[in-house]
Image (cartoon, rainbow, N blue to C red):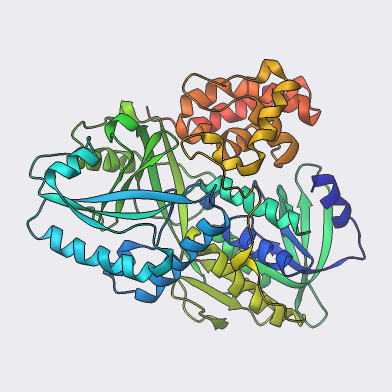
Amino acid sequence: MKRSDIIQQVEDSSKVWDFIIIGGGATGLGSGLDAAARGYSVLLLEQGDFAEATSSRSTKMVHGGVRYLAQGNISLVMEALHERGILKQNAPHMCYNQKFIVPDYKWWGLPYYGIGLKCYDMLARKYSFGPSQIYSKGSVVKEVPGVLTKKLKGGVTYHDGQFDDARLALTIARTMSDFGGCPLNYARVNGLIKTSTGYVCGVEAEDTLSGKSYELKAKAVINATGIFTDDIMNMDNPAHKKLIAPSQGIHIVIDREFLGGDTGIMIPKTDDGRVIFFVPWHGKVVVGTTDTALDSVCMEPKPLDEEIDFLVEHSARFLSKAPTRADVHSVFTGIRPLIAAGDGESTSALSRDHYLTVSPNKLLTIAGGKWTTYRHMAEDCIDNAIQMGGLPFRPSPTQNVKLHGYTEDFDHNDHMHVYGSEASEIMALAEEYPELDQRMHPDLPYSWLEVVWSARNEWAYNVSDALARRTRALIINAKAAAEVAPKCAEIMAAELGKDAEWVKEQSEKFAALAENYIVR
């Protein structure tokens, strides 16, 4: 669905949507897809780009949560493993098997982690990605040539899921559109509309691309804004109890040579008590994450030097060749929307993983959770929104909905796999633009044809959309991404009908953005 088609519906002042969802991250998009797949009319409003904040800054894993198992949270692990299996079933081009090893440097590690990971296997049941195994020291080194061998006793392997978070978000948005839903990025909600009795019945929204404002009505309004949850709740009730306690986490991206092989590493406990992963991803290795409490949130958080040093130092503890700050191609920073409040109003805690509350004024807020369980969270959300809005109940079909681009014909070693069945259509653009059928940069796998495709078919409206989330150039190599930004802007300008001033402005904006990702 083209943006113009969605705007046409938005401009229909007589239209009353079944649902308006505020927030275009994993939870909001998942809820939008769930509602559209059930046959309801649904409009999703995202103030920036889809998944621009937290949902594009994950560890790139679809996992059950080994650490939750250690905490004894069996139900959460089972739910996550179940959802991991459903995602692989419905989008095999987006979610696939990744092998990890837990290296053991203590005498008790092998039996302890061996037993724990066998439990992990059993909880996955028919959705298992592969059995865990105990490895000797020699087998560990063969599996992960870059692992630190000093005092290494052996290790335990296990299997989890891997994905590209921003690409999955876009895939869900496009699937939502396939069902007739209306996902709209760059549409900021500035206020809530209420009935004479005080119930929330719509939103005041602004299309930030055109500058136009709208009053939009709905039978149910859903707040799925992640780290900005409290901002929307303030619009309903300025005296509400604060729900979100934000926490910042960063990841660094280094060359694959530091790891060697295709197997990742999982370290169960770091100095700050978090799990740390070394994840092979898009030809690089993602290392993370950290945990830093915050007082405030923003769309584009900045990494702290001590966070970068923490990950570089921990990498040296587990890799035979220790990376330095100079070896970091990119650092990306995300903010977790952790739950701070208990039952502040009329609430229903549907899961220990996510939190759902309905205010006295009938604003439904869903917060917490993680990417792996996005589909289940969305189902819970819409089940409750149906009741709140007085709509006829229709069951969710999403457990069996194939996501946009579904195909079983792909190669996960080819970066084009994220496009699924549409990869061939992108490559066919070479007939129209033979001069663009080349790599953007020697250090990036992407072609200029992907920029054309993103502007035409994937709601990309600026250089950041194209280089940070449609392709992952900014994440893979921030300096290289900054170098190609001016040409990217020129290509997008031709597609979007923009002038030379726009090209200059976009190039400068992206250069400033890239500085947050470059380690000096």
Which of the 4 image quadrants contains residue 208?
top right
Q: Position of residue 253 (x, y in %)?
A: 38, 36
* For residue 515, above or below residue 205: above
Quadrant the C terminus occupies: top left
State the count of labels. 0
Residue 425, given in percent of the width and then of the height, sits at 70, 34
Q: Position of residue 336 (x, y in %)?
A: 46, 57
Would you say 338 lies left or right of 36 here?
left
Question: Residue at the location (67% across, 69% down)?
Answer: 222
Q: Provide residue 57's location: percent of width, then percent of height.
A: 48, 47
Q: Looking at the image, is 151 positioned above or below residue 272?
A: above
Q: Depth check: 29 or 461 in front?
A: 29
Q: Quadrant of residue 486?
A: top right
Is residue 480 visible to the viewer in this orientation of the structure?
Answer: yes
Q: Residue at x 51, y 45 (%)?
A: 164
Depth check: 318 or 95 in front? 95
Q: Is residue 46 visible?
A: no
Question: Looking at this view, is 435 or 191 the one in front?
Answer: 435
Tell me: 248 left or right of 243: left
Question: Outermost residue, top direction?
Answer: 435
Residue located 70% across and 22% down the image: 430
